[in-house]
Amino acid sequence: MEPMDPGFEFERPIYELEAEVQRLQQQPSSDELREEVRRVRRELADTTETIYSSLTPWQSVKVARHKDRPHTKDYLSLVFNEFVELHGDKHFGDDRAILTGFAKLDQYKVMVVGHQKGRTYKERKACYFGCAHPEGYRKAMAKIRLASKYGLPVICFIDTPGAYPGIGAEERGQARVIAENMFEMSRIPTPIICIVIGEGGSGGALGIGVGDRVAMLQNAYYSVISPEGCAGILWKSHEFAEKAAEALRFTSGHLREYGIVDDVIEEPLGGAHRDHHQMANRVKQYLLKQLRELNGVPGEQLVEQRYEKFRRIGVFLEAPPVNAAT
């Protein structure tokens, strides 16, 4: 086992123990050495569990953005048996920040829609770092309508810091197309399952985030704004991003408590970036469970339940009208 490259200060004890395990494994084998390796491995597991069971919101954001965290393409290869990509929005172009296509998940034929960030700088630049343009959301909606036409369930993987904020995107109707997607997805008479696999930022996430089931991975975040954006607005400086993360209450624990998400999918020990296969298997089992529950439910009932689900989100108080005379 090779130790991971140090990326986060709070993970330093984990890296040190991984390096110790590697050092011991390179020595000549003996009973004493094998026992020492087992001891260090136990300490490594305990330390990792302790650190990851008490992450702060800002640390969760860092984990959600980890360079080795599995992306939509990784889940496509590890979870699904087949995938045929569909391109273009038939209006402007093909946005690489959103992947769409037919897929096979065991016995289920589905439509997959998901954000894609890319790994290398060249890929990330081509994908606009996961920030989709209007043509990306139009592409997503066109493929969701296609799935509805053929009665296929839709699976959405959300992983974006937000919709692309450039002038060109605004000129082509960024806000309008996201609003239209949310409206149309609320009326699609086929099962829709949405999973936040990393970042779930602002309208960029909501553009493909209206579903019968909305789940998120344990160390993902789902928020109306990124912590840096919030800090820039409220405190006029990104230096307060950690403070903003605390105030936003956007971690999986917060959102399940508030009823924003239906389920939280537990990540492998130390985060999804440490074991793609185990994380993919957990996502697959979750999807299969939800597909079994939703498959066969009449379309009209799905739409009604979806509407009621989102109407219940949030808490508000109604005060009696104030008598102007008093």
Image: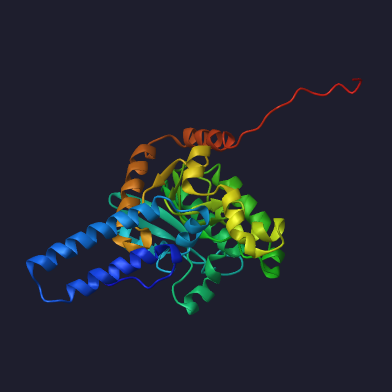
Query: Which of the pair 58/219 is nearer the observer?
Result: 58
**Vertical comparison of 151 with 70: above or below:** above
Q: Quadrant of the N terminus?
A: bottom left
Which residue corresponds to the image point at 83% horizontal and 24% vertical from the top-left? 322
Which residue corresponds to the image point at 44% horizontal and 54% vertical from the top-left? 219
Q: Please identify the residue farthest to the bottom as the structure is shown.
A: 122
Query: Which of the pair 13/268 is nearer the observer?
Result: 13
Camera sees residue 279: no
**Vertical comparison of 233 with 9: above or below:** above
Q: With 17 as the anchor, is 56 left or right in this view?
A: right
Q: With 23 as the anchor, is 93 left or right in this view?
A: right
Q: How is the image coloured?
A: rainbow
- Residue 141: quarter of image: bottom right
Q: Position of residue 266 (x, y in %)?
A: 36, 49
Q: Position of residue 175 (x, y in %)?
A: 67, 56
Q: With 49 as the anchor, is 120 left or right in this view?
A: right
Which residue corresponds to the image point at 89% horizontal and 23% vertical from the top-left? 324
